[in-house]
Image (cartoon, grey):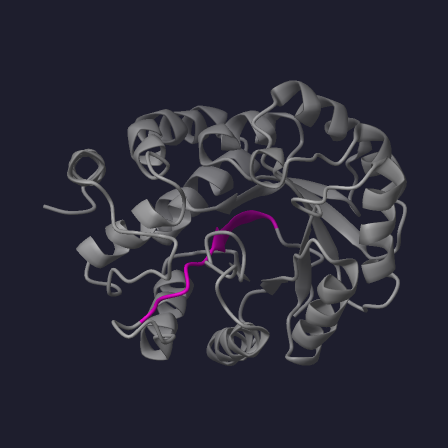
């Protein structure tokens, strides 16, 4: 499906596991249907929230295939093809493209990081070989490096450069990047507590953890902004701040999977080194969910 008109709420989908830590494909289909029924504008699989780090390539491709099949062309499906090895990122990108993914999310090379030119080439050498739109993922808190403003300006000129997921939490950086936005290059918030500020800079929406549990709410916030109802968008953002903060009171995706389990959507199962929530943070999460009516 074309991503040309994709704006709004893109869910960074969790990967549900069974008790034996195998992939719960029935749960995955249930989650996809939940999003299709509640207005989610696009689905990202195999990102940070998708817990892809402890998964094999074969498992990644199986998840991508399952989601693409279940979505059946109704909304775009984006696949995370991140790696700190450029060759591995390319191989994964090509594998996802072969399985019908509509776009790719490419993260900066974590741990080894590289210099500015190396980071530029890391993205270019993948984009040169694929035939689908690519989104750069800037999240220095996870990777230890950032996409420089200069590299954003250079990378956006590539024909396969479609946008950036900006998750630095640095509004000054986002403001600089906003200079480079156009109909062909978009910015999505990667922080659920900064969606409206990013939209105010010309952003196109959010790639969201929050949308896993409240897809209609996140969609409606983005739609309100797009329709010019900025006050409603701001109200939704502010009314849900405690819920959003509680989703990050432990490392993502631990809280969001706990929330989905509490809603009866999936089992609360992780792969190590992720571990279930502590009692105090779990109580905070459940209280926030009660506060916005997600649970009774």
Is residue 258 visible in the rendered image? The answer is yes
Whether residue 237 is in magenta: the answer is: no
Q: Position of residue 12 (x, y in %)?
A: 49, 53
Q: Quadrant of residue 27?
A: bottom left
Quadrant housing the N terminus: bottom right
Q: Position of residue 9 (x, y in %)?
A: 50, 48
> Is 266 displayed left or right of 3 in the figure?
left
User: In the picture shown, does residue 274 fall above or below 62?
Assistant: above
On the image, which quarter does residue 188 sit in?
top right
- Give the answer, above or below, for where 178 lies relative to 101: above
Examine the rendered structure and indicate whether residue 32 appears above or below residue 140. below
Front-most of 9 and 226?
A: 9
- Of 5 and 255, the residue lying toward us: 255
- The residue lying toward the viewer, choosing from 15 and 101, is 15
Q: Residue at x 65, y 44 (%)?
A: 111
Using the rendered image of the protein, determine whether residue 227 is visible from the camera's viewpoint.
no
Q: What is the x, y in percent for residue 139?
A: 61, 38
Instruction: Determine the image quadrant of residue 278.
Output: top left
Q: Which residues are magenta?
A: 7-17
Of residues 203 and 16, the one nearer the viewer is 16
- Of all residues, the one furthest to the top in this rendering is 172
Q: Residue at x 17, y 34 (%)?
A: 280
Residue sitting at 50 percent across and 68 percent down? 55
- What x and y, as percent, mark residue 204? 63, 41
Find out whether residue 8 is within the magenta segment: yes
- Number of dots carrying numbers: 0
Which residue is at a point 70% across and 46% down the rendered structure image? Answer: 108
């Amino acid at each position: 499906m074309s991503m040309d008109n994709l704006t709004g709420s893109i869910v960074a989908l969790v990967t549900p596991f069974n008790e034996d830590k195998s992939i719960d494909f029935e749960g995955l289909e249930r989650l996809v249907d939940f999003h299709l029924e509640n207005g989610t504008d696009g689905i990202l699989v195999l990102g940070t929230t998708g817990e892809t780090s402890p998964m094999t390539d074969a498992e990644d491709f199986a998840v991508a295939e399952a989601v693409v099949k279940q979505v059946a062309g109704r909304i775009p499906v984006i696949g995370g093809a991140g790696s700190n090895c450029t060759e591995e990122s390319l191989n994964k990108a090509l594998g996802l493209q072969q399985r019908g993914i509509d776009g790719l999310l490419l993260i900066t090379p974590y741990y080894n990081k590289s210099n500015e030119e190396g980071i530029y080439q890391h993205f270019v050498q993948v984009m040169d070989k694929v035939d689908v739109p690519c989104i750069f993922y800037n999240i220095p808190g996870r990777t230890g490096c950032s996409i420089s403003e200069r590299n954003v300006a250079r990378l956006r000129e590539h024909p396969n450069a479609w946008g950036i997921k900006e998750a630095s939490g640095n509004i000054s950086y986002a403001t600089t990047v906003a200079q480079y936005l156009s109909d062909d290059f978009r910015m999505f918030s990667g922080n659920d507590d900064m969606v409206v500020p990013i939209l105010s800079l010309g952003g196109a929406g959010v790639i969201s953890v929050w949308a896993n549990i409240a897809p209609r709410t996140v969609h409606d916030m983005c739609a309100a902004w797009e329709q010019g109802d900025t006050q409603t968008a701001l109200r939704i953002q502010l009314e849900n701040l405690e819920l959003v903060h509680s989703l990050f009171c432990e490392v993502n995706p631990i809280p969001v999977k706990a929330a989905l389990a509490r809603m009866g959507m999936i089992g609360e199962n992780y792969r190590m080194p992720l571990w279930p929530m502590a009692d105090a943070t779990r109580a905070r999460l459940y209280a926030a969910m009660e506060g916005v009516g997600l649970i009774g």
